[in-house]
Amino acid sequence: MLLGTSAAVGILDEELRLKWASRPYLELLAAGGDPLNRPLTDFAGRGANLPFYEAVEATLADGVRRTVRNYSGDYQKVFDNVITRSGDSVVVEVTDATSTVQAEEQERLARSAQDAITEHMQEAVVMIDFQQGTVLTNQPCVDTFGDFSWLRDFVATGRPLAELELGFPIDDPEGRLRKSFEVGLRVMQTGEPFRGVLEMPTLRGTRVFQVVSSRWEHDGQTRGLIDIKTDITDAVTAQRELETQKQELVSLTLVKHFAQGVAHDSGNVAQVVKGYAQLLQSNPTPEVLNAAVEGLISVAQRSVRLAHDVSEVARIGEVSSTPIRLNELISLHLPALQRTVGEHVQVSFSTSADPVVTANEGQLHSILDNLCENAARAMNWQGSTDICLFVADGRAILQVGDDGPGLPDELSGRLFEPFSSSASSRAAGGTGLGLYLVREYLKSLHGDVTVATSPAGTTFTLSIPVTHGEDESPEAPR
Amino acid sequence: MTGQRVLLVEDDDDLRKLLALACDLNGLSACLVSDVDEALAVIEADHVDLVLTDLNVGGDHDGLRVLSAGVERGLPVVVLSASVSFSDKVLYQMGATRVVAKPFDVLALPALIEEVHNA
């Protein structure tokens, strides 16, 4: 009956030795080693097959049919055995269960991986397993992005990830989910892990995530992709609110400082006007009259300049900008600058470039006026000031230097704050807003200004993004 | 009264010229300086009997340094203030003899100095 069978069948005697075997049985033996025809004692130290031999002995004794699993000698194969008694022999029908057991093991591993990410992680986790054609997601991920059934269906087809059409159940007008997915695609292609912050629409509105995406390597092979997203929206929102509050505080402090500066200056002007009026009233002499006229004209001019600079502060960022050739603008403005600094200060201009910047002509004039006047004042209106223009790293660099005695240490740190200059420099023509205006003008042009000072002189360096330049030589002129 | 040696600290050139003229017309012997360090040196050298100082000197409230130095020397100190950031109370707590808000009466300077000196 058994001779014609295609099943893997072996017959063992009461000593548990193989008496007969079908061809498939012999093939199994050849493929995976002999799991059966070995003395019981062989397995004494490796108890994996002991239950099989115990079952054979039990069936031999009581005639009850048993089903038991055992392993090949090298443990590479797993067999399911159905054991029956036939007279004083035992018939063992063997089925190779290796692939079934492996699949069960994979499933068990996958389940335990899923359990692990579900139970222990608040992060939204997606594990795409291209080897198994499966997609594992945890609850935070499902709650945030949906169940990914569309991705599961796609991965099951075994097609390349690049062919994937996104099926997020979320409105994504700005394509940010696609961008996030392209990150994963790049990670798969290059093997370079990605770590960064992405803002994405989710089922719970737009959220911000810290994203870690890396290739899933297993036994030296690419198995898939692991993507972990940590929702950091609350932290980011708190940080942004803090920044806003900080900014508001800075603005408020600046406004207070500004108001105090204007109030102080106005108070001094009022004091001078009232003082001369009183002196004239009590001493109407030519000497007092001359002093009063001179003093009143001086404070009147100061007030006009202050009013002008305050209104300039109010206009920052509100003026129109056009492309301007800096070289030409400075050259044409040189006579006006010379008049500003007076006959005892020599203004010179050198350039190695002809950059074009997008700015307001009047504001650029004001910047030059302020810096040259500042330089002349630092030199007590006697000496030379050099303007130098060149291009470096796509920016127009403008330097205004003087050979004055340098700035006092206590002033250089807050030079660009409003009303930081001494009142004597204000009385000598400054309003206390000049360098503040220079910095604010440059900020509005996405530029900046720095200062370097020493006992040999002071140099202000301005940097403005170039719109276009005929000669963008990076070399500074000598 | 004209014997009083008055130190006047004011860094606003226009205002200092006015005060110089006012002192001159009123027969006051005044040493006018624009710089805090210069003022401290004058106080240190014991060259004055009375100090009048602007609060906001040098773009900052450096007049407070002059106030402290004068108080330390036992000198009467008058603070001239156009500032909204310091209350008179704080300045008095720091030892100011008088706090005078700008604009003040320049004709009343001699009387003010007399009063403060006798305080």
Image (cartoon, coloured by chain):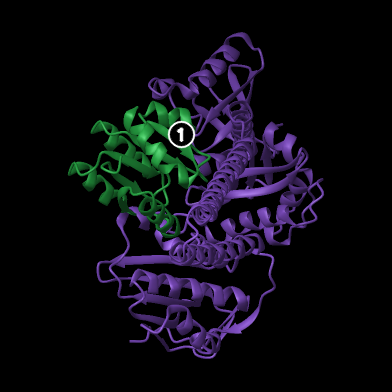
On the image, the x and y values in percent for residue A336 come to 51, 84
On the image, the x and y values in percent for residue A3 come to 67, 36
Q: State the SS at label 1.
A: loop
Chain B representation colour: green
Residue lying at the far top of the rendered structure: A62
Which residue is more in the foreground, A345 or A367? Answer: A345
Locate residue A426 relative to residue A445 in the image: left or right: left
Residue lying at the far left of the rendered structure: B45
- In this picture, is B20 found above or below A115? below
Q: Quadrant of residue B11?
A: bottom left
Which residue is more in the foreground, B109 or B101? Answer: B109
Which residue is more in the foreground, A83 or A165? Answer: A165
Q: From this viewpoint, is residue A227 visible?
A: no
- Three-letter amino acid code of the residue under disc 1: Gly
Q: Quadrant of residue A376?
A: bottom left
On the image, the x and y values in percent for residue B48 come to 24, 42
Chain A representation colour: purple
Mark 1: few/some/many CA within 10 Å (<14, 14-19, 20+): some
- In this picture, is A399 found above or below A77? below
Residue at image point 54% right, 27% down = A70
Q: Quadrant of the N terminus of chain B?
A: top left
Which residue is more in the foreground, A176 or A38? Answer: A176
Residue identified by numbered label 1:
A73
